[in-house]
Image (spheres, rainbow, N blue to C red):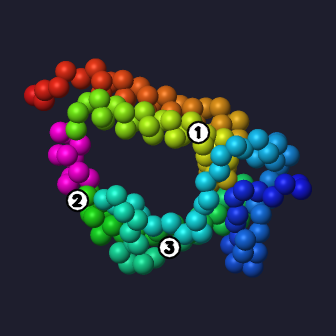
Amino acid sequence: MSNPSPIQARAPSGSERGAAIRQSASFSAHLKNLEHKIPLRSQYENFIGGKWAAPAKGGYFDNVSPTTGQVICQIPRSQAEDVERAIDAAQAAADGWARTAVAARARALNLIADRIERYLPFLAAVETYDNGKPIRETNLADLPLAVDHFRYFASCVRAQEGSIG
């Protein structure tokens, strides 16, 4: 495994911080063909109201890959207060989104689909590390279906006639 993984991890004990994730031969072959990569953070926050926000009580836990047993990153141990902030932010945004023209809403959904497609092989690799699914499923089924869903709902939005009730 001469090619280092584009995804860095550490052992749960913290003793191998920054070590490359162990990978199978088929996974190594997949990683060699990645054209686009996104730097992954060692710790993530909650995304609430368009901003990254630390969890209300400051707790985090290790996101351990079931395929390797290594820590991919730390993620927030969110509590009820965090969920309430997210609900409040979603409710505050709902009226503005509802007033957004259907063409603009469809365009936003299609842009998300475009971005997933651009980074699909890399996102498939991250998804495989995160949940343990075989790369063929994340690369050939899960993520392409996510793209299809965004495009489908973009077309549904365009088909709306515009009134509520």
Query: Residue 145, percent across and down?
Result: 53, 31
| Closer-to-camera residue (104/122) | 104
Residue contact between numbered discs 2 and 3, judged by CB atoms under 8 Å: no
What kind of secondary structure does the magenta stretch mostly adopt?
helix
Q: Using the rendered view, name the quadrant where residue 84 is placed.
A: bottom left
Report the disc number at residue 118.
1
Residue at which label 3 appears: 60
Q: Using the rendered view, name the quadrant where residue 143 is placed.
A: top right
Residue at which label 2 appears: 88
Depth-wise, is mark 1 or mark 2 nearer the camera? 1
153 to the left or right of 74: left
Which quadrant holds the C terminus? top left
Q: Residues within 10 Å of mark 1 (few under 14, many from 20)?
A: some
Q: Residues within 10 Å of mark 3 (few under 14, many from 20)?
A: some
150 to the left or right of 106: right
Q: Residues within 10 Å of mark 2 (few under 14, many from 20)?
A: some
- Residue 133 in view here: no
Query: Residue 68, percent across and down?
Result: 74, 59
Sequence-wise first label, 2 or 3:
3
Tell me how far mark 2 sits from mark 3, CA to CA: 22 Å
Q: Which structural element holds mark 1? A: helix
53 to the left or right of 143: left
Q: Which structural element holds mark 3? A: strand
Sequence-wise first label, 1 or 2:
2
Q: Which structural element holds mark 2? A: helix
Q: Which residues are magenta?
A: 90-99
